[in-house]
């Protein structure tokens, strides 16, 4: 790795006597870590399910270092959304945000969704997660990661921050800005990050970060919490952005971020994490908007749809919170606390249950049938499903399913049916006559 000289000079003056340890760490391989999904697995289930011991990372109680050779894509538990692969210090931002069940939380720069999945875990299905990603081509990965995680109560949008935050002024209890940055904390993982780096790029990032924070402030209610994070070390993009934000937003003040890992910044209120702290590199600061406010009301819920209600009953043994709704051909379970979604680039609201399709030949014109969605299965545990083919990790049908093959199944299973491995749902299929026809989405299949 050819590190730019100007970057070295900056780090030398930033770190002083700690610079040699930093430069030595830059020559080491990057950390690998996972974060457990509390919606799906307990700590002891995860320990029992993985072939290596878990070593805790200091940035979140759910993060653990994994061996370099671990290939998550080959692990069925990863396909089941039991964990998310995430550079360990990246978990610090949501630890500092500290979302609570029932709150409204905005993740303004969300793709590919590492921090959104962590927020969804903390909300535990209660309240609202709004995950926004302005770059449209990055939204499918965000959607797929939130589906695999089993998120029921999220809105996913692709909207410019200034438009979104103006429309949702004062709506959120917590807002996370995990800002696009010069990515100095990615140097060990990405040659591209190294070659893209320049002092001009750092300055351009700082200008953009200030603009995003301006918007974010608008979406936050008085008394709410705003967290700013980057994966870069530059003072211009970190302390510089916060200081300039605080100058122009007197209603905001820094508060202790409650994280002991890493190095102190901004009078000890914020944190900087370097490779010698056990993570690739992050900066996190937490601010509060002064005042108190009544919660802004949610928009009136749409009329519940009978078709969505029927689909819910056909899939699940228990009632899930929310409004069953039909929008076009698609059936959803909408979270209880939604604002108006109009004009905000929303690509998903709540849980996609399934889709109405024309009936296959031979029936009357206008007849339709409902086909469930992959997301509908991923959002629950196997025992909540009306029907599930429950497999152990050793069963060869687990890998066969992930490869997209048709499986053998008990004759007693009939119709749409989940499939699970060691207590976590992998997807679904359609059973008939002792066969399980595979519905694992093609783009997710193991090659
Ligand atoms: N929070 C994500 C996660 O944990 O997976 C990572 C977010 S990444 C650091 C920053 C994101 O900001 C990128 O997905 C990028 O596309 C997006 N972005 C780029 N320009 C932006 C802008 N002007 N406003 C808001 N977001 C922007």
Image (cartoon, helix red, strand yellow):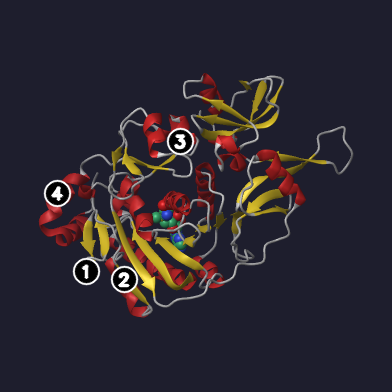
Ranked by sequence position, the earlier of labels 2 and 1 is: 2
- x then y, percent, for residue 208: 40, 67
Q: Name above or below for residue 184 compared with residue 208.
A: above
- Residue indicated by mark 3: 78
- Residue indicated by mark 4: 21
Horizontal side of 27 relative to 398 (left or right) equals left
Whole-Å distance between the Cαs marked 2 and 3? Answer: 37 Å
- Residue indicated by mark 2: 254
Whole-Å distance between the Cαs marked 4 and 3? Answer: 34 Å
* Foreground residue among 276 and 414: 414
Visible residue check, residue 417? yes
- x then y, percent, for residue 439: 63, 32
Ranked by sequence position, the earlier of labels 1 and 3 is: 3
Whole-Å distance between the Cαs marked 2 and 4? Answer: 29 Å
Q: Nearer the viewer, mark 4 or mark 3?
A: 3
Q: Quadrant of ligand 1?
A: bottom left
Ranked by sequence position, the earlier of labels 4 and 3 is: 4
* Foreground residue among 296 and 407: 296
Label 3: element kind:
helix
Q: Name above or below for residue 43 compared with residue 293.
A: above
Evaluate if marks 2 and 4 touch, with contact meaning CB atoms under 8 Å apart: no
Whole-Å distance between the Cαs marked 1 and 3? Answer: 40 Å
Evaluate if marks 2 and 1 touch, with contact meaning CB atoms under 8 Å apart: yes
């Amino acid at each position: 790795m050819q590190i730019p000289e100007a970057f070295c000079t900056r780090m030398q003056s930033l770190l002083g006597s700690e610079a040699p340890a930093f430069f030595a760490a830059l020559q080491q391989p990057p950390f690998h870590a996972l974060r457990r999904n509390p919606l799906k697995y307990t700590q002891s289930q995860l320990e029992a399910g993985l072939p290596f011991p878990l070593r805790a990372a200091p940035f979140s109680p759910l993060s653990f270092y994994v061996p370099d050779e671990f290939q998550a894509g080959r692990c069925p538990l990863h396909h089941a959304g039991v964990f998310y692969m995430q550079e360990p210090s990246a978990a610090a931002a949501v630890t500092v945000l500290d979302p609570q069940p029932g709150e409204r939380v905005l993740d303004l720069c969300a793709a590919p969704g590492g921090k959104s999945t962590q927020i969804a875990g903390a909300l535990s299905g209660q309240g609202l997660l709004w995950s926004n990603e302005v770059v449209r081509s990055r939204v499918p990965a965000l959607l797929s990661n939130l589906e695999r995680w089993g998120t029921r109560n999220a809105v996913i949008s692709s909207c410019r921050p200034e438009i979104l935050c103006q429309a949702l002024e004062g709506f959120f209890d917590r807002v996370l800005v995990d800002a696009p940055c010069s990515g100095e904390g990615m140097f060990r993982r990405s040659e591209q990050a190294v070659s893209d780096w320049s002092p001009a790029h750092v300055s351009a990032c700082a200008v953009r970060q200030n603009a995003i924070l301006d918007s974010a402030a608008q979406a936050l209610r008085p008394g709410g919490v705003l967290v700013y994070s980057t994966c870069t070390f530059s003072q211009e993009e970190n302390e510089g952005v916060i200081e300039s934000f605080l100058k122009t937003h007197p209603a905001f003040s820094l508060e202790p971020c409650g994280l002991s890992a890493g190095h102190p910044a901004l009078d000890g209120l914020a944190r900087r994490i370097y490779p010698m702290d056990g993570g690739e590199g992050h900066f996190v600061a937490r601010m509060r908007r002064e005042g108190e406010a009544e919660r802004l009301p949610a928009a009136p819920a749409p009329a519940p749809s009978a078709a969505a209600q029927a689909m819910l009953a056909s899939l699940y043994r228990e009632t899930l919170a929310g409004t069953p709704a039909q929008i076009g051909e698609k059936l959803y379970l909408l979270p209880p606390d939604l604002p108006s979604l109009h004009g905000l680039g929303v690509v998903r609201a709540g849980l996609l249950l399934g889709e109405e399709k024309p009936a296959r030949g031979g029936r009357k014109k206008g007849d339709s049938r409902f086909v469930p969605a992959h997301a509908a299965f991923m959002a629950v545990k196997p025992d909540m499903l009306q029907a599930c083919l429950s497999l152990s990790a050793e069963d060869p049908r687990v890998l066969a399913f992930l490869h997209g093959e048709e499986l053998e199944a008990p004759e007693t299973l009939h119709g749409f049916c989940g499939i699970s491995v060691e207590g976590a749902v992998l997807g679904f299929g359609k059973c008939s006559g002792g066969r399980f026809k595979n519905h694992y989405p093609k783009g997710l299949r193991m090659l």
